[in-house]
Image: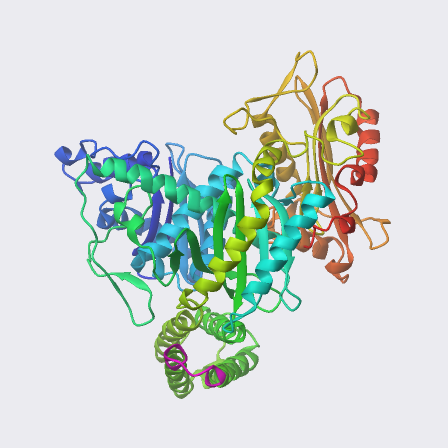
Amino acid sequence: MQAVLIFDQLNDVVYLRCDHRFVRHVRTMAASQGLLQEQDLADPQPVSPRSRLGVSHLDPNIVVQIFSPLVTSQRIMATQFNNPYTSVTCQDGTTVVFQEYAGYLFVGVGHQEECHLQRLISMTIRMVQLVVGPCVTILKRSATKSALLDSLLEAWQRLYSSEQSYLVEAVERLVVNSELSAAAVKALASVVDKMKAAKELTPCHAMFFVRSKLLALYSSRNAQELSASDLLFLNLLVEASQVKELGQIEECETDNEINTETVDHRKDDDGIEVDSSDSGEFYSIPSTPSLGRHAGLVEDEQEGKIRSCVLLLHTEVCHLTPHLVHYETLSDGLALVIVSEINRTQLSVQLITLLTGLEEMLAGNVNSRGKLILDACDTAVRKSLELAKRLPRSKTAERIEKALQQVHYRWENVKKSGVEDWLRTASDAEVPTRVDASLTSLVETTRAAWRTACLAVSSATSAQLVESAVAVAADRMADYCHFLEVKALRNMTLGCRSALTINKYLEEFPGLVHFLYVDRSSHQLTSPTLLTDEAGEISKELEVSENGARALTVARVWSMVEFARSHLAKGHLSLMWKDTTFSYAYFLWFEDGSGNPLKPGELDETVSETLPLPGVLCEDFYRSLCTRAFPGMDPNRLRVYELFCIHLGLATSPCVLEHTRRLAATIWEVTGPMDANPADLL
């Protein structure tokens, strides 16, 4: 059983994603509490066998009534006692976890371990930021945004359980020879050149993914650098489109047997699709057949086979930088992604600064910084209005300026409500009623203005340029598509470089079964590919010797990583352990820019209380770890490495340690030096 729920400040459900076991569980609880008649407990009408979401079979009012006591208790513990729940475990083994973002409560429910549910909720929050930013309520009104979030979560859960790159959250490069690498880079360069003609977009990035592996990345001269987490999310977007296509095919098949109602839709003033049916239906790909018919919308436009959407990527300038993303599958496995920055970055910076200050004041977390927060908000309001006036004249610019004038008007009301006196004289965190009302109104107005400026963007003006760029890339890569598809399935088991293959390399390490080497400075993964069957699915067994006497299951690899992470969260940077078959080792170490090892400061078991979950998708754990281990030192000057090793059980500890040192020193012989590969333009 598994479910993800998002509640707003009124305890209404904004978003719900769940499986059929959760639906049955909630309906059973509702019947026991008299919220549902016994005769209504009959199994609902069948849906696609692949469907994991049974949202349409749940009455949202029942969900609210069942969860309201728990949600209300959580909010009281957070606001009045400053001691919110992290998780709650029920007698039947069900675990409920809680996290908050932008005033919305994210709840995860399931029978899995707490750490897994916490990661799921953290990923949900990060994907919400990616899709709608601080405007979480859009998920309740927009079928398109809700469907995109559904498909992203579905794709992440699938890749997290099958791809090593998503398990350790690092980019895996497709290792090819220099000729093919150069051809891919030239094709991407031509794509970027084509996109320069789009006046409303700033210089962009173009990249090729082959079955979740990065083949090449090319960026224009002035483009902001893409982080490794953004690269993983962009590949996730490609995978999510395939999830959506499969879901739509199965929905069409199910439509022949099930009578469904098409929800009436309209668009609000910002071009954001909203639901006007008042039906309370929550959107999910498999159980909402109408979602397959939304081509051409502002938020998720499709020109032929080319898909487009707005994503809020994390850059050094702003953690919610609006980008217009076009993506297309050129062949089975080869996908082209084009990322262009929308000229609204500075507007987003100012409005996010304003929202952050307002939320701090609403929460009473001002301490002695009241004057600083007030000045920052005042500056943000003024600068955002100035930026809006500089936009090229158009209907969109007029809507943005009008929305920001409303923000300015509300801000003046806030200053008249006595907020300055409260910030100057307040001795506790309680916010006066008048100030609270004016701040709440301004938060909603600011979110609406941010949505108008950063989300209501159309790809129609650049559609022809994108089609032309995609056609050029498809033509230049046509001769390599089949090879790349096969290569992706055997990335490190086929001949990777003319000088050395991974198989020959492993011969130098007798007893070594498998390894994962991660350069955490750039978050790049090097590892032998887990063997796959003819259908491309990961095999349940990986032969570790010619005789096949022992086999390493994929589950053991995943279990190894989870076990190592559980100790890393406690501050343990090196460990070795055994089971009945294999010996496992995990090491994390630091180096300076010259490659000299650095000894970190003392890390106790309370380190997990101040650090995020290990990984980079939700938040950069390793950067935070550097700050904690080397206080006062710039994390950018440090290099961090991780190494997971699996040896046969007979391997001794000295042998494992010796292999580890040699592996770390010579891994470049397989992948090539980082700067020597023209495909590596990270």
Q: How many marks?
A: 0
Is residue 601 visible to the viewer in this orientation of the structure?
no
Q: Is residue 435 above or below residue 33?
A: below
| Percent position of residue 231, x then y | 58, 52
- Where does the N terminus fall, quadrant-wise? top left
State the residue at coordinates (13%, 33%).
39
Q: Main secondary structure of the magenta part?
A: helix
Instruction: Classify residue 365 as left or right of residue 292.
Output: right
Decide which of 167, 627 is in the foreground and name it.
167
Is residue 396 shown in magenta? yes
Q: Looking at the picture, how far across and down is residue 327, in whole percent?
A: 48, 53
Q: Magenta region: which residues?
A: 388-398
Q: Is residue 657 above or below residue 612?
A: above
Q: Residue at x 22, y 50 (%)?
A: 61
Residue beneath the point at 46% across and 66% down = 462
Q: Position of residue 308 (x, y in %)?
A: 44, 57
Q: Is residue 554 above or below residue 642?
A: above
Whether residue 270 appears in magenta in the rendering, the answer is no
Image-based side of 405 in relation to 598, left or right:
left
Q: Is residue 89 visible?
A: yes
Q: Nearer the viewer, residue 191 or 426?
A: 191
Res. 21 image quadrant = top left
- Quarter holding the C terminus? bottom right
How is the protein colored in the picture? rainbow
Q: Nearer the viewer, residue 97 or 393?
A: 393
* Residue 282, position as x, y percentages in the image: 28, 50
86 relative to 5 in the view: left or right = right
Q: Is residue 294 above or below residue 647?
A: below
